[in-house]
Amino acid sequence: MKLALAFLAVLVSSSALAFKPTRTIEVVVHTGPGGGSDILARAVAGMIEKEKLLPVRMQVVNKTGGGGAVAAAYLAEKAGDENTIGFFTGVWLTGPLTSPEYKVTLRDLTPVARLVLEPALIAVKADAPFKTMADFINAAKQSPGQLKQSGGSPTSRDNVVRQLLQKHTGARWAYISFPGGGERIAALLGGHVNMMVIEPAEAGEHIRAGNMRVLAQVSESRLPGFPNVPTLKEAGFDIPAVPQVRGVVAPPKIPAENVLYWEDVLSKLTKSASWKKFLADNQFEDGYQNAADLTKFYDEFTGRMRGILQEAGLKLVR
Amino acid sequence: MDVATGLLHGFALALQPLNLLWCFVGVLLGTIVGILPGLGPPATIAMLLPLTALMNPAGAIIMLAGIYYGAKYGGSTTSILLNVPGESASVVTCLDGYAMARKGRAGPALGIAAIASFVAGTVGVLGLMLVAPPLAKLALAFSSPEYFALMSLGLAMVVLLAGRSMVKALLAMLVGLWIAGIGTDVFTSQSRFTFGRMELLSGIDFVVVAIGVFALGEVLANMESREEAQVLPVPKGLRNLLPTMQDLKDCRFAFAQGSVLGFLVGVLPGAGSTIASFISYGVEKAFSKRRHEFGTGVIEGVAAPEGANNSETGGALVPLLTLGIPGSGTTAILLAALVLWGFKPGPLFIAENPGMFWGLVASMYIGNVMLLVLNLPLVPLFAQVLRTPIYVLYPLIIGISFVGVYAGSGSLFDLYLLAGFGLLGYLMRKLDYPSAPLILGLVLGGAMERALRQSLMMSEGSLSILVSRPISAVMLALALVVLMIPLFSRFNTWRLRAMEQEES
Amino acid sequence: MRHRSPDFWSGLALAALGAYIVAQARGWDYLTDDGPGPGFFPLWYGIAILACSAWLVAFGKSPNADWRGTGRALATWAAVALSVAVVKVVTFAVAFGALSFFIVAVMYRRPPLVAALVAICTVAGFYLVFPFALGVALP
């Protein structure tokens, strides 16, 4: 009996690994060359090659436009294609909520895995009167609407953090959108805004030069690069973590065994040394989730985002 | 490290044979990339990034920077010869450059573009070397109100580009503003004028409009006549192939203001080389004795914008190297490259990596010289392109336009848009609507709206923020002055005519 | 029609655009809590377009353009549009080759052999330069 079971097990596992890509894998990203997703995809492709996790090469394909809408639509067109995957980010989840032009949401595609969470820091100019997060919140309470934060579009994580904090504390401050990261930092350093949510990699040098100060971290646990900065929870602001995510998705109608294969490759990747180094260098958090968990995360995340965006005064279409 | 020592070390590094080679490879690649429409420095640099991992970082940054400013040299070539902007900043060069080519002066146009690029490029590097840190601090004082004032000044220049009918120029500019507004509003995520199409969610790419209206529009307009007539006379004789001494003299002011203006605009994060070249062109036209001839092939009209878009590269490197803030798409990728090689661009970069900084600066001097030496002799060669019979040239232009646009975005929808804008360009020509204001409105419209709304958010709704800050107040005043210019000249003619009537 | 300057018609067309813009802008927020909304700018430049085009319709005096060659230009444009429409179906080589052939043979009345030669050479040139030498995809 045990032999039969063992035989069955081998049979099942080998059929689960029966899928093997035979052509160059097309990796779809929604940014142009040099953009966030593009760099991540190229880095992942490089690491997978180095660790020899795939028998074939990976080729990054840029399908820009519509903040992910074009890339998502492209993946949907490739339904059933086993040799295509895509890298998604938070924009793919929030975009469809506010823009009716999105034809394809992440749910229409096949979720594969979640890879990284990008933490952030709450930063102010070095000569600002705020030494802790509480200082800023109190100042905001005293002059509602007068303090200003620079950030990206209102659906971006920057504003989500602001909405959650405002709701939690009752303080209010203004939010000014700047399409480019450089402009946001320039606005902060020039004293035109009071605070911003910034990525650790971007902030590092300005902090080292003494131009910026960090009040709190937007992450689950303290980042190794910032051991002395409290997380929002530790600072007393118990808001739900709404992270900036990146992960892998596949065209619709892919057989389950393919998904298992990809999950296998990606989870092996996340255990490798080069991945750990990559995370450390870029100050990302490992956020690996397999396809099932990713689907749950997606539903939870979208539900929460709907609430947050509605409170932010945005018009939702889905 | 003071300037002299730094420069010496820099040249020692830049003159090493391997680094010289990378410099040459970079500027050559850059020139080619600039010539081909649609393929720009950001994409090229991104494609080469993995290769640079095998090189030493100094050589790599020298090469990538070479691509960056080399592309500005090449961009003018197709603008002048074919009315196809090779690079978005070269759009302004099309205005007088192509007109010069039609008058048989393609050679001098190409030549002056190369010379202006050299002069301005060198000034840009000088600026980077000498005034980078204090200027960067000053640039931080520039924020949304100042940007709004700058954009207003730029749009006020439309009165200088108007030509015969001011109303038509205004209409063209307004349509440009509208096209700029197509897409997702960054402040509210509201989709505007997207007609339900997701391809329009991020707006219409400037290159698609520029190539459509300029290049395709021109080809369609030329299709009307079947004559064999040589549309573009080929300059004969060496003297006609290069700018004359008189030309160089005419361009003195252009060289000066193009270099300075381009550099200053480049320092501002977010303001790009297209804005720099428009402003420089406008200033040149405002101060020129031949201002009414602009648009018909005036050589200063080529020198000014070409100079400005080259010194802008030097300027754009200022916020990147002194603050770690990328001001444009290309500098963003250069930033990514520096990070990839383990550097940390930021306020401490120059102090901690003086070798890299000075090596880069020295290589830029060398690179500009290389580009001048590369481009000038090629001028007669390029001018021969005009010998091609038009029935070969026009299909080629159409083909280059489509391939170029597709290379940039990979989107079939963009090709439909291109065809549409080609028709628009043709109709504008027939109905006598000037196309420069359309491009001006398109380039500045989005930035201006954003700057105004950001300013009002900063001031919590009060417009006074625009005039209470000195820099923006001054620029808005200048914009008003510029708007008054046609009124002054009309007042002047009226006054003169009144005096004549009195005397008779 | 002979008495109406072309400005009348282009003015009308632009006025229609202006009206469309204003209508759309009315559907968006003019002012939000944080400042001007998405409807602010479009409303104003839409009104400006209406005003300018109204002026043009009333006072525009441009001389009539020479419309004789327009048929040829529009025919060429139609060929271009058609070639873009079919490029995904028949590949770039065929679409562009046909367009070149059309331009040379029909527009410029060159003999078919020359037209074919031009078409083939330019297509080959494009394939050589772009995908082969530069690795850039063609439509």
Image: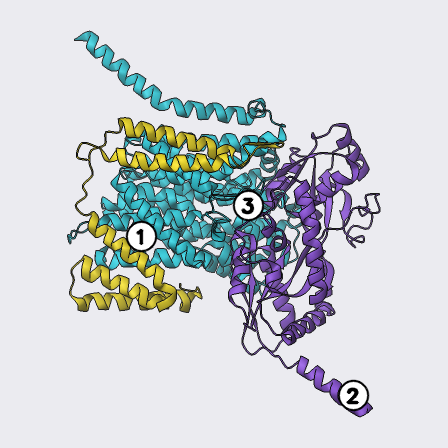
Question: Of helix, strand and loop, which one carries label 1?
Answer: helix
Q: Which chain is purple?
A: A
Callout in the foreground (3, 1): 3
Residue underneath mark 3: B317
Which class describes the residues within 10 Å of circle 2: few (<14), some (14-19), or many (20+)?
few
Q: Which chain is cyan?
A: B
In the picture, which quadrant includes the C terminus of chain C?
A: bottom left
Q: Which chain is yellow?
A: C
Task: Let me know if residue B83 appears in the view.
Answer: no
Residue C127, x across and y down, in percent: 36, 68
Q: Which mark is residue B379?
A: 1
Q: Name the side, left or right, on which B3 lies relative to B483.
A: right
Residue A11, x across and y down, in percent: 71, 86
In the picture, which quadrant includes the N terminus of chain C?
A: top left
Residue type indicated by callout 2 = Leu
Who's the residue at 18% across and 47% down the image? C69
Residue type indicated by callout 3 = Leu
